[in-house]
Image (spheres, rainbow, N blue to C red):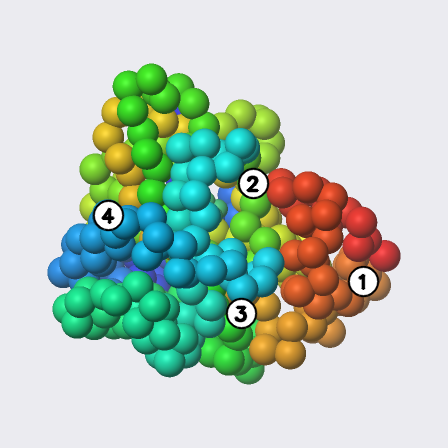
Amino acid sequence: MATLPVIDLAEFSDQNQRKNMLEASRYWGCFRVINHSFPVDLQSQMKAAVTALFDLPADIKRRNADANLCTSGYVVSTPENPLYEGFGVYDASSLNDVDAFCSLLDTPIHVRETIKTYAQKSRELIVDIAMKLGEMMGLKDQNFGAWPCHFRFNKYNFTQDSVGSHGVQIHTDSGFLTLLKEDECVGGLEILDPVSGSFIEVDPLPGSFLVNFGDVGKAWSNGILCNVKHRVICKAAIPRFSVALFLLAPKDDKVESPPALIDSDHPRMYQTFTYDDYRKLRFSTELHGGEALSLLLM
Ligand SMILES: O=C(O)CCC(=O)C(=O)O
Ligand SMILES: [Fe+2]
């Protein structure tokens, strides 16, 4: 069975690591990173912080209201994803926004500090990975640091009866790039092999992060990067937690391939669109697996 490439960021000057990252981004739309700069302790502290948030009474959790389609605040099980529960924070690149989220939920000071530090460090890591990719694609001056981020904490209320059911349905992420911290104790994430058309299980690797591209990644790169389809399946009767940071789209919200990625052999594939409009399109068409992009082809 095919396995997901693992990229060693400490060895990134090595040509093989660079080549593997670009190839994985094109083929899978996904790879794992190890030996990154993210503090290991912070990963376990964050799991404890997120667990504490989900343990709050329902009326407090609902204070994380859904401000708009982009942020999707607190979500409790839906008919499509009955085992799922999640919090959303927008814009995670603003410490004020993260602070406001914590204030709404009356989080204790140590939980607040963990969430803020995690937001900051994971944003640094996702921007660093985006810059590395940009450089490999010949776009050294692209400033991903200004792009807004959405932060999401996921809980899957898995029970014995739910083994084999979906924790979250097949989807692509709508933004550019996602940094995912899976539950290190409970597997269940599966990604689509675009050539064989079958899903492969992605087992957690302690200390690592999963990185994947979404629909903006595919459109912005003029079809070079793959927007990976993925899902979560319940494998065991243990609650599963994950934390995702989504680097969404350019600061002005306009998604358009840079001229350097367009030539006569690779004509522009997609109309220019705004991320906000694209989210609305995905929502109204209920096309959550990247299919909505085909409505924007030139
Ligand atoms: O929980 C996971 O492992 C995946 C979460 C996910 O796909 C998402 O938040 O978009
Ligand atoms: Fe996802």
The numbered mark, 4 or 2, whose residue comes first in the sequence reads 4
Where does label 3 land, which residue? 134
Residue contact between numbered discs 2 and 3, judged by CB atoms under 8 Å: no
**Measured Cα–Cα span from mark 4 to mark 1:** 44 Å
Q: Is residue 174 visible?
A: yes
Q: Nearer the viewer, mark 2 or mark 3?
A: 2
Q: Which residue is mark 1?
A: 271
**Disc 1 residue type?**
Gln
Q: CA distance from mark 3 to mark 1?
A: 21 Å
Q: Is mark 3 within 8 Å of ligand 2?
A: no
Q: Quadrant of residue 261?
A: bottom right
Instruction: Pick whichever of labels 4 and 1 is earlier in the sequence.
Output: 4
The amino acid at mark 4 is Asp
Q: Secondary structure at mark 1?
A: loop
Disc 1 to disc 2, how far (Cα)?
Answer: 22 Å
Sort mark 1 into few (<14), some (14-19) or many (20+) by Cα contacts within 10 Å: some
